[in-house]
Amino acid sequence: MRHALIGALGLALLGAGAAWADDASPAAPAPDKSGFTLFNPTPDADLRSLCTDRPTKSTAPCTVDAGRWQLEADLYNFTTQTTGGVTTITQVFTNPTLKLGITNTLDFEVNIAPYEQVSIHDSIGGVTVAARGAGDLFLKAKWNLVGDDGGSFSAALLPYVKLPTAGRIIGNGAVEGGVLAPMQFNLPAGWQLAVAPEVDALANAVGPGRHANASLDLAVSCPATRTLTLDAEVWGNENFDPAGAVTQASFDLGAAWIPAKSPTFQLDGGVNLGLNRATPGLQAYVGVSKRF
């Protein structure tokens, strides 16, 4: 799996690089927005187009304009997974991420699901366990390195830490963290290729200590109409837990609609389809985003 992910990343970058080079043309220099901060907000005339980390699992390298707020949230998220006769159903009733632009290329993000419901049913033993409550708290910072205000390529770094605010079954009670390095290639005809490698330090499933976890997103998006964008993504994850390594993979589809008369609002939805037994067989969601 690791070799496949590395090979897929290499091919994607080579293909995107070739398309980017073929489409390269002189562009007007981006305006100087370095003076805008949390305390000197970006004026309406200089705001970027709405850019979100939704739908699908991919993370975009764009940040929220300085001094502006942005809300991105699942309205409802349903996940089901069956392994060895045990079926786990997770329902998330809203899952908001609140973003605040600190500078022109840096934002701070807070995410927590206020209410989750997890049900675990063992068809062999006939036992059902359920848990309800808030999820874990995620604190993130996204720092754009290049391309926040246009261009053919953009990249960012996004470190995060997870604080254990969830109860048993919903969470594992551990502080965890990691870093993402999302990249995006703007291709001809409005197409985009997003590549998002991630490395995490996760708590061991059994006993003390932590182990590495690595994942990779490859996502392609294209405009279906002037207001509707379609997304397709391949995701892979390798968890190196000492108790036993776990490989996951999924094929994800999503769609996002930004109304022509409301360019700061987005409605989206999607489905994620597991490609092996260790991955949830189905995840479906609908959500919204709004910049203020």
Image: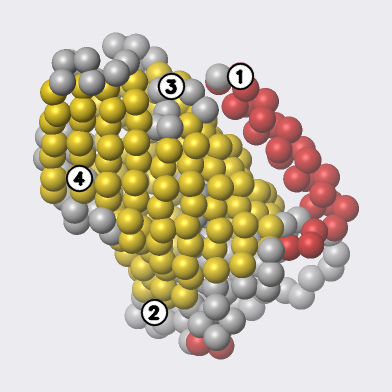
Q: CA distance from mark 2 to mark 1?
A: 42 Å
Furthest residue in direction right, as rendered: 22
Q: CA distance from mark 4 to mark 1?
A: 36 Å
**Which amino acid lies under the numbered mark 3 shown in the image of this protein?**
Arg
Q: CA distance from mark 3 to mark 2?
A: 41 Å
Disc 3 target residue: 277
**Which amino acid lies under the numbered mark 2 shown in the image of this protein?**
Phe
Lower sequence index among marks 3 and 2 = 3
**Which amino acid lies under the numbered mark 4 shown in the image of this protein?**
Gln
Circles 3, 4 touching at the beta carbon (< 8 Å): no
Circles 2, 1 touching at the beta carbon (< 8 Å): no
Q: Position of residue 56 (x, y in %)?
A: 50, 49
* Front residue of 7 and 130: 130
Disc 1 target residue: 3
| Number of marks drawn | 4
Image height check: is 225 above or below 96?
below
Query: Which color scheme did the rendering employ for the protein?
Result: secondary structure
Disc 2 target residue: 292
- Give me the disc on residue 117: 4
